Image (spheres, coloured by chain):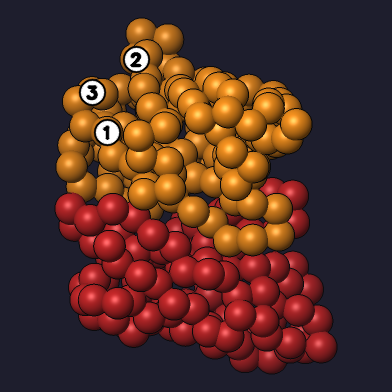
Amino acid sequence: EVQLVQSGGVVVQPGGSLRLSCAASGFTFDDYSMHWVRQVSGKGLEWVSVVSWDGGSKYYGDSVKGRFTVSRDNSKDILYLQMNGLTTEDTAFYYCAKDSESHYRNSWHYFDHWGLGTLVTVSS
Amino acid sequence: DIQMTQSPSTLSASVGDRVTITCRASQSINIWLAWYQQKPGKAPKVLIYKASTLQSGVPSRFSGSGSGTEFTLTISSLQPDDFATYYCQQYNSYSLLSFGGGTKVEIK
């Protein structure tokens, strides 16, 4: 059974930094690209970032480019999102999600499995 | 970037109704579209991918159609478990990903 276990919710001050993690099991982690998607409470879904199966390609949405960095540790089956320069507009649930297709580097697909989400609150 | 527009944003319906949700892309995405269902406090769940392929385990009352820039999700006979918010997502080759704004299906 595929499982994506995310780190717990946190509160951080504006301008602060935070690293989210997502531990994967139940599939061959280093075969698949992995994504981060966020959702402001009561609002829609926003794709945030993707890292390819081998870590060689990384892409970001415009709202986080230059502030967030996605990475993965294939030896530990863990996905990360380093978030710097946080603002109140980054307050949201952050989901990690598994790409549906294996071994793509610059082409992405739909999400067939999701983590339960981590609530990030940016507040003074 | 490809923009996805869903309509309506809210839909009121009764159990047994046939429900249709529309998703339009700002440029052609061929058939590279998925539909998700999300219930309050839960992660989204994929229902349909490649515009019309039903994900394993999803009831057959859900169906998808369309290609190019216009797509629809249809629920043939709405059940109590179907009251939720539905999102489309495009995954056109070599493009960044994007979602529609969502359609909340409410009890009439």
Indicate the colour of chain B: red
Q: Are marks 1 and 2 in contact (CB under 8 Å)?
A: no
The residue at which mark 3 appears reads as A54
Task: Give the image location of residue A25, x and y in percent.
Answer: 49, 22
Question: Which disc is residue A74 wearing?
Answer: 2
CA separation in Å, label 1 and label 2: 15 Å
Q: Crowdedness of circle 2 by 10 Å Cα count: few (<14), some, many (20+)?
A: some
Left or right side of B107 for B67: left
Amino acid type at mark 2 = Asn
A122 above or below A89?
above
Question: Which disc is residue B12 wearing?
Answer: none
Task: Give the image location of residue B44, x and y in percent.
Answer: 58, 53
Q: Give the chain letter at badge 3.
A: A
Left or right side of B81 for A62: left
Q: Residue furthest right?
A: B108
Q: Crowdedness of circle 3 by 10 Å Cα count: few (<14), some, many (20+)?
A: some
Closer to the camera in the image, B89 or A83: A83
B72 above or below A71?
below
1 or 2: mark nearer the eye: 1
Q: Residue furthest top?
A: A75
The residue at which mark 1 appears reads as A58
